Image (spheres, rainbow, N blue to C red):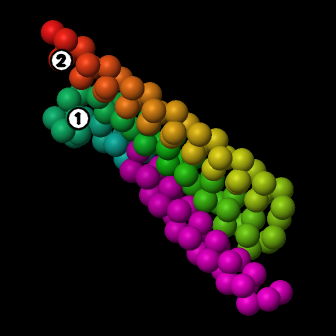
Amino acid sequence: MGFGTGLMKTLMFVFNGIVWVLGLVLFVVGIVVLVEGSNWNEIVDNKTVPVSVMLIVVGLTIAIVGFLGCFGAMKQNGNMLLVYAVVLGVIIIIQCVAGISLLSSVMRAKISSRRS
């Protein structure tokens, strides 16, 4: 194993380890918001359940993706890295579609407001 390969393996392990920990933190925050929801009602206008569920789902997804990348790199498991790459690809496609959709709706609203 050359220097570049070892460096890439170490960097992938470290950065995905950080992503994994941050995903777990987001998951725990979602659970705390769900359990302590009555204390958060004034802040989020009585919508703590949807916010907490979103935090739990996003945190768990980030933690799973981080785990796949971190331990796939550490163990050099091709299957874990393939699933990691596919999941990241799907996330990037979803973000692009959401961004284009948001941009088109904003542009449509601006065009319709100028016509009025």
User: Residue lying farthest top?
Assistant: 116
The residue identified by callout 2 is 114
Q: What residue is at 47 percent from the left and 61 percent from the top?
A: 22
Disc with the residue nearer the chain's start (2 vs 1) = 1
The residue shown at (31%, 26%) is 107
> Could you say where residue 59 lies in the image, as x and y percent from the top left?
50, 48
SS of the residue at dot 1?
helix
Residue interval drawn in magenta:
1-30
Left or right: residue 50 versus residue 81 is: left
Q: Which residue is drawn at 39% across and 50% down?
A: 29
Q: How crowded is mark 2: few (under 14 residues within 10 Å), some or many (20 or more)?
A: few
The residue that mark 1 highlights is 44
Relative to 28, is 39 on the left or the right?
left
16 lies above or below 82: below
Nearer the observer: mark 2 or 1; the answer is 2
- Amino acid type at image mark 1: Val
Secondary structure predominantly adopted by residues drawn in magenta: helix
Does residue 6 sit above or below 75 in this rendering?
A: below
